[in-house]
Image (cartoon, rainbow, N blue to C red):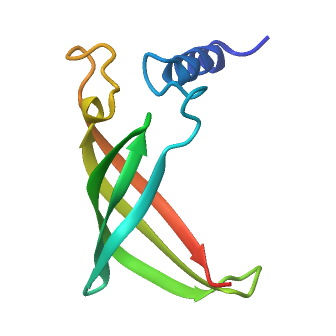
Amino acid sequence: MWPLWTRASKKRDDHLRSPDFFNAIEFPQITFKSTKVTFQGEGATVVGDLTIKGVTKSVTLAVDSINCGVHPFSKKQVCGFNATTQIKRSDFGVKYALPAVGDDVSLTLEVEATKD
């Protein structure tokens, strides 16, 4: 038998996958495609198109710092960074339980890119 917290987490995750929230059966992917990158000191601003539930909106990601080097295992050139932005989930059709459940969502992306 699974511990209570694991069952509760699964129930929550299943609800988030349902049509009430992300409708993961019909929309199995959330995508972001950059359209503009502006480097500023150690960081950058990345503008791009975020698609959730088939709705695409332009968002701006703030990147504090970019770290590049040789990956210790693959020996390939790699760069990593964290990017953040704020969205309103209702802008993407995720309106379940508004306003009881907040509309403002903070997104944090952890990215690692390898040069081929």
Q: Is residue 72 above or below residue 31?
A: below
Give the quarter of the image for residue 13. top right
Quarter of the picture holding the N terminus: top right
- The mark total stands at 0
In front here: 116 or 35?
Answer: 35
Residue lying at 43% horizontally and 22% vertically, measured from the top left: 21
Residue lying at 59% horizontally and 36% vertically, measured from the top left: 28
Q: Is residue 14 above or below residue 39?
A: above
In front here: 23 or 113?
Answer: 23
Residue 71 on image: x %, y %: 67, 82
Give the quarter of the image for residue 24. top right
Residue projecting furthest to the right: 1
Q: Is residue 62 above or below residue 73?
A: above
Residue 62 on image: x %, y %: 28, 65
Residue lying at 32% horizontally and 34% vertically, measured from the top left: 92
Query: Is 90 on the left or on the right of 112, as rendered?
Result: left
Residue 45 on image: x %, y %: 27, 72
Residue projecting furthest to the left: 99
In front here: 95 or 10?
Answer: 95
In front here: 27 or 2?
Answer: 27
Residue 20 on image: x %, y %: 43, 16
Query: Is 98 on the left or on the right of 50, as rendered?
Result: left
Residue lying at 30% horizontally and 13% vertically, measured from the top left: 97
Quarter of the picture holding the C terminus: bottom right
